[in-house]
Image (tube, rainbow, N blue to C red):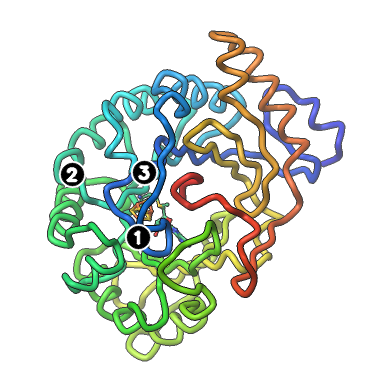
Amino acid sequence: MNKSDTSNTNKLIDRFGRQVTYVRLSVTDRCDFRCQYCMSENMQFLPRQKLLTLEELASVGKTFASLGVNKIRITGGEPLVRKNIIWLFEQLGQMEQIKDLTLTTNGSQLHKYAENLKSAGVTRINISIDSLKDNRFKDITRTGNLNQVLKGIDSAIAAGFNKIKLNTVIMKNHNHDEIIDLVDFAIERNIDISFIEEMPLGIIDSHARDKTFYSSDKVRHDIETKYSLTSSNKNTAGPSKYYAINNSDSSVGFISPHSHNFCESCNRVRVTAEGRLLLCLGQEHSVDLRDIIRRHPGDFEKLRSSLIAAMDLKPESHEFNVNIEPVILRHMNMTGG
Ligand code: SAM
Ligand code: SF4
């Protein structure tokens, strides 16, 4: 595809011919947890007027859908702590173009909302869990309660989503000894699990990231001491590589953002809680959608043309390095996972 294809006004195509079909929308920077790798202990959150309103979020979703986006993931912060968030899921769930409406959550509120989310049209849920030990869970999340999350996982399973996946960030000497236990836990429940390499996003105060880094290759090696894995050719156009776990219905994924080889097939963009369209997780190229929406209220065409124009800013690839100070000062709760 060449540059002239960007004139196609029904699709989001960047300078490298990649079509954006997947948007991650962060609906809040707030969270009831303070996970060590994600936030510092005393986080300053955005004043409410800086967040996109639920109506603004719905119109962003609708505009993306009109431009060929068929998958929206709602993330945060913790999406389920935002007041009236189910309304947004209902709005997005009604859009015919959106085939996949997904949520990433820490699970703390899932016992209350799993049924509502299913009825609103959520297809898949990712639930983060880094430890199955009470004290350790508390230590990593600082404020989280393991039992509440386990209850949330049970409620999600009972509600019958198409897919449930656990997300685990592995940190050396914090939870790397629980890899097999977490895989066992997923297999027992017929759900999937992904292990995420820690990313150097934002300055944190609990640990030096180069000391806790535990590579996906090591995690896979640990799992293979108990299970045999068969590489799956599922292409997520993302930094994930999936394997079937033999003799089970579960699969295991490895999310290795330090590897560059997925950039060429990148199909995604992100919108931060304050409405900044980020063209790449590891770079700062962005467009202030909140400003556009608030300067041109109700002007769907203006937002649409701004999204099309933004595609020219999408960089070819990202840069991450755990051994140097973060160049990206955004915390993950601003960006969404
Ligand atoms: N609060 C929700 C949750 O925890 O699932 C959604 C937002 S959270 C930012 C999304 C995902 O990002 C979680 O799976 C979390 O473990 C992961 N995450 C947060 N900070 C990270 C970091 N520095 N490196 C890698 N993953 C991170
Ligand atoms: Fe909250 Fe999710 Fe960040 Fe943990 S990873 S502090 S649950 S936003």
Residue at image coords 42%, 69%:
195
Q: Is residue 83 left or right of residue 146?
A: right
Decide if residue 165 is in sight here: no
Circle 1 Cα neighbour tier, 10 Å, few/some/many (<14 / 14–19 / ≥20): many
Alpha-carbon span between mark 3 and mark 1: 18 Å
- Closer to us: 94 or 38: 38
Residue at image coords 69%, 61%:
319
Q: Name the residue under label 2.
A: 159
Circle 3 Cα neighbour tier, 10 Å, few/some/many (<14 / 14–19 / ≥20): many
Q: Is mark 3 on a helix, strand or loop?
A: strand
Residue at image coords 32%, 25%:
90
Image quadrant holding the N terminus, namely top right
Question: In the rendered structure, which amino acid carries the disc numbered 3?
Answer: Leu
Q: Image quadrant of residue 317?
A: bottom right
Q: Name the residue under label 3.
A: 103
> What numbered label is drawn on residue 35?
1
Dots 2, 1 in contact, CB < 8 A:
no
Of the image marks 3 and 2, the number of the one nearer the N terminus: 3
Front of the two marks 2 and 1: 1
Tell whether circle 1 marks a residue whose Cβ is less than 8 angstroms from ligand 2. yes
Residue placed furthest toward the bottom: 225
Dots 3, 1 in contact, CB < 8 A:
no
Alpha-carbon span between mark 3 and mark 2: 14 Å
Question: In the rendered structure, which amino acid carries the disc numbered 2?
Answer: Ala
Q: In this view, does 179 lie to the left or right of 290?
A: left
Q: Is mark 1 on a helix, strand or loop?
A: loop
Alpha-carbon span between mark 2 and mark 1: 27 Å
Q: Is residue 69 left or right of residue 42?
A: right
Q: In this view, does 8 lie above or below 209?
A: above
